Amino acid sequence: MRYLTSGESHGPQLTTIIEGLPAGMPLHDTDINNELARRQKGYGRGRRMQIEKDTVEIVGGIRHGYTLGSPVGLVVENNDWKHWTKIMGQEPLAPNEEDEVKRKVTRPRPGHADLNGAIKYGHRDMRNVLERSSARETTVRVAAGAVAKKLLKELGINIASHVTEIGGVASSVKAYDSLENLKEITENSPVRCLDPEAEKKMMNAIDEAKQQGDSIGGVVEVIAEGMPSGVGSYVHYDRKLDAKLASAIMSINAFKGVEIGIGFEAASKPGSEVHDEILWTEERGYYRRTNRLGGLEGGMTTGMPIIVRGVMKPIPTLYKPLQSVDIETKEPFTASIERSDSCAVPAAAVVAENVVAWELASAIVEQFYSDRFETLKELVEQQRTFAREF
């Protein structure tokens, strides 16, 4: 499977085309809209979330609620476009209009793609960069991930996420009864946190950052249960599933770190406290006593829950902006200010959940025959039985 996205933050719409879905998979726009709504929630979000109420329009690849096997086209309109038609319109400007373009950006923001992108493509107006490098693009990445989540759910694979840290405030609650229990708690938390005490402190930290014109980051965790063992590859470096998951997390705007299982903690522990002992019962087949390696060994799934964490840095748009340099005058200035969130970590958890879902679904479709969805379901179940009886 693969997909491309198109569109700018304040352009008319965001678009994605998904290729490689099996035919006969049930899919409805509500499957996608639920995920889009989740992405827009979270304490610390800015005014943009009040303007945009993201909903998807399926424009190809679906008939009567089922995939056709052809590319699936998804569109999310930007409701704010009506205020940006002159600034972001596609029509060429007249020579006398070029100097009248509003909201031209010549002061790059530290920590953003503005300056590097302008140098790469030669843009004198860095709006050409920031409109595409904006996290608004994750809207249709979540839409694509929602399709992947639907595929996984139909195969008995469930996925969820939660926030473990914001602004240095860490959750002390690690345990949950089930993935459904985790979902129920975090969906009702403004910061998607399992720990009610940490939740309050996180919200206070976000409020304080906002009052100071600053921003804060955090850590999110994604858990996937039900993946059959042996998905991925130890044979080729570019087919290792843990590598693909790490790449997916790092491709999210503002993410600067990723770990699987205990991750960096493994560096300070002896091997006896890192590796997961192998057990077997007739009912379960092979399983691990612990899950320190996060459900992945040798680039392949072990059948244990997959656990991936990502570190999101503070958003670079600040209301007390850092020093920058105007690319036209070369004079020192404070950086440009764009409408922004003081903290987007809760929303980023949803994005991370969906990009992980995409990689897991893609790995399954790559490994098993997948032209017909019913056949794919049978093959995945056969793999589970084979692993249990091996």
Image (cartoon, helix red, strand yellow):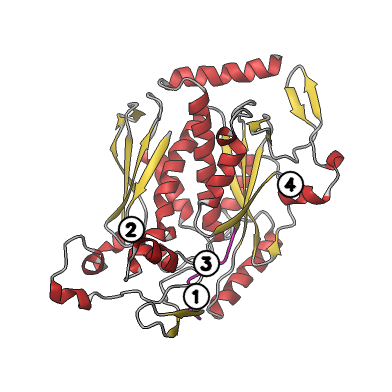
Per the image, label 2 sits on a secondary structure element best described as loop
| Amino acid on which disc 4 is placed | Ile
Mark 1 surroundings: few (<14), some (14-19) or many (≥20) residues within 10 A: many
Give the magenta part as a residue range.
Answer: 312-320
The disc placed on residue 318 is 1
Q: Residues within 10 Å of mark 3 (few under 14, many from 20)?
A: many
Residue that label 3 marks: 315
User: Mark 3 or 4 closer to N-term?
Assistant: 4
At x 58%, y 16%, the residue is 382
Horizontal and vertical percent position of residue 57: 30, 44
Residue 234: give x, y in percent of width and height.
Answer: 64, 29
Where the C terminus falls, by quadrant?
top right
Q: Which residue is mark 2?
A: 8
- Label 4 sits on residue: 262
User: Is disc 3 in contact with disc 4, using a CB cutoff of under 8 Å?
Assistant: no
| Residues under numbered marks 1 and 3 in contact, where contact means CB atoms less than 8 Å apart | yes
First-in-chain label (2 vs 1): 2
Q: Earlier in the sequence, mark 4 or mark 1?
A: 4
- Foreground of the two, 72 or 282: 72
Residue type, mark 1 in image: Leu
User: Which residue is depicted at the point 14% across and 73% down?
Assistant: 95
Going by the numbered disc 3, the residue's amino acid type is: Ile
Q: Nearer the viewer, residue 6 or 37?
A: 6
Say which quarter of the image contains residue 128. Answer: bottom left
Q: Is residue 66 magenta?
A: no
